[in-house]
Image (cartoon, rainbow, N blue to C red):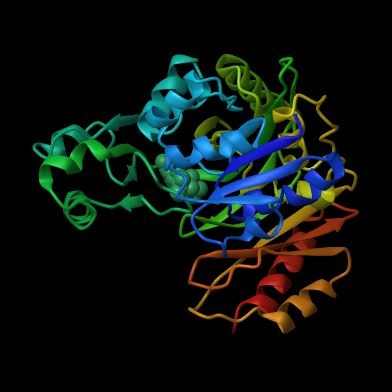
Amino acid sequence: MKRVGIIGGGQLAWMMGDAAKKLGVELVVQTPSSDDPAVAIAQDTVLATVDDAISTKILAKKTDVITFENEFVNLESLSFIEHQGVCFRPSLEALTPLLDKYHQRCYLQSLGLPVPQFFALEQAENLGSQIEHLGFPVVLKSRRHGYDGQGTFIIKDLADLQKQLNLNTTTKALSQSLFLIEEFVPFERELAIIAARSVDGEVVTYPVVETQQEQQVCRRVIAPADITPNQAAEIEAIAHTLLNSLEVVGVFGIELFLTTSGKILVNEIAPRTHNSGHFSLDACETSQFEQHLRAVCGLPLGNPALHCVSAVMVNLLGYEISGSDYQSQRQKLAEIPQAFVHWYGKTESRPGRKLGHVTVLLDHRNRDAISTIANNIESIWYPS
Ligand code: ADP
């Protein structure tokens, strides 16, 4: 497999650029705008939205295999193309139980994996009695098209729930079936693991990381997470069960909660490379992006191990509407010892938009020192 089509042209596709060069693979992206980050590293581009399956047919003509950088695709229309012999990795069958958050939770539960209590919101009536057994606060989530906390709402009471539902739905009839409600997990920490499965069924996992979110958006990732060997083994086992059950080919990100009593719950599966694995670009023998290309091209998987003692990754999130390229802040960040700055080349900054990230490699696991470095990065990046 020498030519890989990627549906989606954001930073996750962009970060496959160097790995593609290394592996001698050509990338063709399907993305709506020629300003999107991955257009710069692609050999060719199909300018179309990611749910435009007619354009994916054109992408298929230009490539040997098609993969995904985001999950906002229309599986039904893609399945026509798959029946005509186009090779998708991961397969559409593997993606089917995952794209809707409610279906995903049901699937995880059917595998016996631990998940927060949840149910699908089906009708507007009797909201109170539907939620009664969970108790407030609860978490309301859009079943589809949520990302970076868009579509995730922490709800403190019934009035709040009604308000959010009214704000987020246009017609009452349409509204309810679009949401999932789940228990609010008062987690002690959030964790994540990146796992990859090859065409031959080999599964490798990256070190479990700690992720830190603010307002539901990832701010920092620390690799490896400070957890017990048993907890790490449990999370690795979850990854193996999931990837093997789905028989997926490619990289997946799995987000988890660690509760105060030491219990692990699966929050969400991203059927693609994931923000919690960006540290691997600089800190691991094989990055998640190279690993994904290796998997989808049918190559043997690479070594996912860290080549440093630990690493911290900090997202550079937009904080204003601007066309600036933030050159001087990036320069200052690059001067931090062992820092690697990745700038996605987006033409417009908006509050909360992921514009880049910085990873710092470390020769220790001192939590306070790691926090100091992350604080320093954020104080350089965000205006005071
Ligand atoms: P997205 O797909 O938008 O990333 P997530 O389900 O990952 O949505 O939620 C984003 C963040 O919201 C999580 O990382 C976590 O901080 C918080 N969150 C989500 N679900 C829950 C929950 N059930 N209990 C507590 N916090 C939650």
Residue 105, above or below 28? above
Residue 236, above or below 192? above
| Residue ID at (59%, 54%) | 212
Quadrant assignment for the C terminus: bottom right
Q: Is residue 71 left or right of residue 12?
A: left
Q: Quadrant of residue 61?
A: top right
Across and down, in percent, residue 281 comes to 79, 49
Inspect this view and state whether residue 178 appears: yes
Q: Nearer the viewer, residue 345 or 155?
A: 345
Q: Is residue 118 left or right of residue 340?
A: left
Across and down, in percent, residue 14 comes to 67, 54
Inspect this view and state whether residue 254 appears: no
Across and down, in percent, residue 239 comes to 63, 25
Q: Is residue 257 left or right of residue 338?
A: left
Instruction: Report the residue that reaches farthest toward the left.
Output: 125
Quadrant assignment for the N terminus: top right
| Residue ID at (47%, 22%) | 108
Q: How many marks?
A: 0
Q: Nearer the viewer, residue 268 or 232?
A: 268
Q: Nearer the viewer, residue 276 or 174?
A: 174
| Residue ID at (84%, 36%) | 305
| Residue ID at (82%, 72%) | 334
Across and down, in percent, residue 337 comes to 88, 68
